[in-house]
Image (spheres, rainbow, N blue to C red):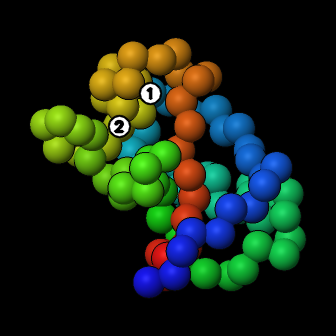
Amino acid sequence: MRKLKVWRGLNCVITVQPSISSADILSLAVPKLKLIEPELPDEEYCLVYCNGRLADTVPPNNEAFTLEGYKTFIGKAFQKLTLYVCPVED
């Protein structure tokens, strides 16, 4: 396993519905990131939390990920939520 590489200054905001899943967020974020940074490798990506954990469930109950569920767990406003796109290989 490789260490995660940080692309500093590379971020994008996407507007979505609260009920969106992590797979749907990823399908919107990756194409937009590739437009912003054309040098982004053509790899398979996944969505992760700030600690590097896969964002497929929402702690502590491990229910299926929804943005609304994550917002409730974190206790922040939607515009303050941050998720990371990471190559699956990492």
Indicate the secondary structure of the residue bearing disc 1: loop
Indicate the secondary structure of the residue bearing disc 2: loop
* Place of residue 9 in the rendered image (x, y in percent of width and height, measured from the top left): 82, 49
* Place of residue 5 in the rendered image (x, y in percent of width and height, measured from the top left): 65, 69
- Say which quarter of the image contains residue 61: top left
**Tag 1: residue type?**
Pro
In space, the residues marked 2 and 1 are separated at their CA atoms by 7 Å
* Place of residue 2 in the rendered image (x, y in percent of width and height, measured from the top left): 51, 81
Which dot marks residue 61? none
Tell me whether the residue at label 2 lies in contact with that at label 1, contact meaning CB atoms closer than 8 angstroms: yes
**Tag 2: residue type?**
Thr
In the image, taking residue 9 as reference, residue 21 lies left or right, namely: left
Foreground residue, 86 or 32? 86
Q: What residue is shown at x 36% (from left), y 58% (from top)?
A: 54
Foreground residue, 55 or 1? 1
Residue of label 2: 66
Residue count near mark 1 (Cα–Cα under 10 Å), binned few <14, some 14–19, many ≥20: few
In the image, taking residue 60 as reference, residue 43 lies left or right, namely: right
Residue of label 1: 18
Q: What residue is shown at x 26% (from left), y 47% (from top)?
A: 57
Q: Is residue 83 above or below residue 7?
A: above
Q: What residue is shown at x 31% (from left), y 25% (from top)?
A: 73
Q: What residue is shown at x 48% (from left), y 64% (from top)?
A: 46
